[in-house]
Amino acid sequence: MTTLTVDEVLTTTRAVRRRMDPSRPVDLDTVIECLDIAVQAPSGGNIQRVRWMVVTDPGIRASLALLYREAIAIAMGEQRQPATDKVRSAARHLGDILQDVPVLVLVYGVGAPPPNPYRVPGFYGSIIPAIWNFQLALRSRGLGSVYTSSLNRRDSEVSALLGVPDDMTQVAMIPVGHTIGTDFRPAPRPPIEEIAFFDHWGAARRHRARPPGTGARSSTIPETMEE
Ligand SMILES: Cc1cc2nc3c(=O)[nH]c(=O)nc-3n(C[C@H](O)[C@H](O)[C@H](O)COP(=O)(O)O)c2cc1C
């Protein structure tokens, strides 16, 4: 376990791609410990609809990597609001090393997203908080991860490969590995004054300065190293 504070874990859990170290094996007991923590996340109606598939088999990882590379090639061609070159190149780099990342965790929701659009947030909102809990728990144990959704474009192929039943919805794939160094920093984000309003849309409020390391102001904090 690291000695990071809760706020440090919350503000430095980055999408680890370039700083993923595929050469170091990951202890599966640690992954299971993090899954135990993950499932403490809230879920709508306390219906436990999240399922996990932990892949370590090198042959299956290679097949997933192939599918992931196909998927990001399509995703990048389609993007209406293209990600920055840095993010695209990090996503491509992840594709290049994915077969070597020791643990790939596929995350599923039981059932299909509801047809009623008002209920869709409840479906994904009962899965994604658990994924983030998982990533935070990994970080606090010195492991890195990255939330990815691109492989969902190849969900039928993935399901066939892993024997996943038809009534599961693939939500994310989380590659997990040791990181190259552990000194991750808060990332640049929009200032709260621009995105949080009080009592009336557009009504911002200046806030007191945050303690160092607990917040990033896009105007004052330099860009983090690409993770
Ligand atoms: C819903 C979602 C989908 C994502 N899909 C991918 C992906 O397919 N491939 C990838 O390399 N990163 C993916 N990411 C990671 C983002 O690119 C990353 O979180 C973002 O660039 C911000 O970096 P940070 O998490 O280090 O702050 C995804 C993140 C989220 C939340």
Image (spheres, helix red, strand yellow):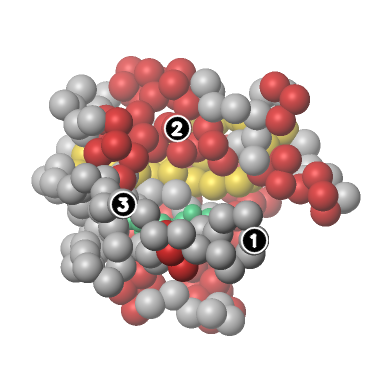
Query: Could you say whether the residue bearing mark 1 is in a helix, strand or loop?
Result: loop
The first of marks 3 and 1 along the sequence is: 1
How packed is label 1: few (under 14 Cα within 10 Å), some, or many (20 or more)?
Answer: few
Q: Quadrant location of the C terminus?
A: bottom left
Which numbered tag is attached to residue 208? 3
Up/down of 93 relative to 167, above or below: below
Residue 169 visible in the picture:
no
The extreme right residue here reads: 116
Q: Position of residue 27 (x, y in %)?
A: 27, 24
Q: Amino acid at mark 3?
A: Arg
Q: Quadrant of residue 154?
A: bottom right
In the displayed structure, 226 sits above or below 172; it is below
Q: Which mark is residue 133?
A: 2
106 lies above or below 146: above
Seen from the viewer's position, the closer of residues 102 and 209 is 209
The residue type indicated by label 1 comes to: His
Q: Badge 2 local density, few (<14 within 10 Å), some, or many (20+)?
A: many
Front residue of 113 and 24: 113
Q: Secondary structure at mark 2?
A: helix
Say which label, 2 or 3, has the lower sequence index.
2
| Residue beneath the point at 46% across and 39% down | 132
The residue type indicated by label 2 comes to Asn
Ligand 1: quadrant of the figure: bottom left
Q: Secondary structure at mark 3?
A: loop
Left or right placement of residue 106 versus residue 17 in this view? right
Residue at 26% x, 49% y is 210
Res. 200 mark: 1
- The residue shown at (21%, 51%) is 185
Q: Residue at x 54, y 37 (%)?
A: 129
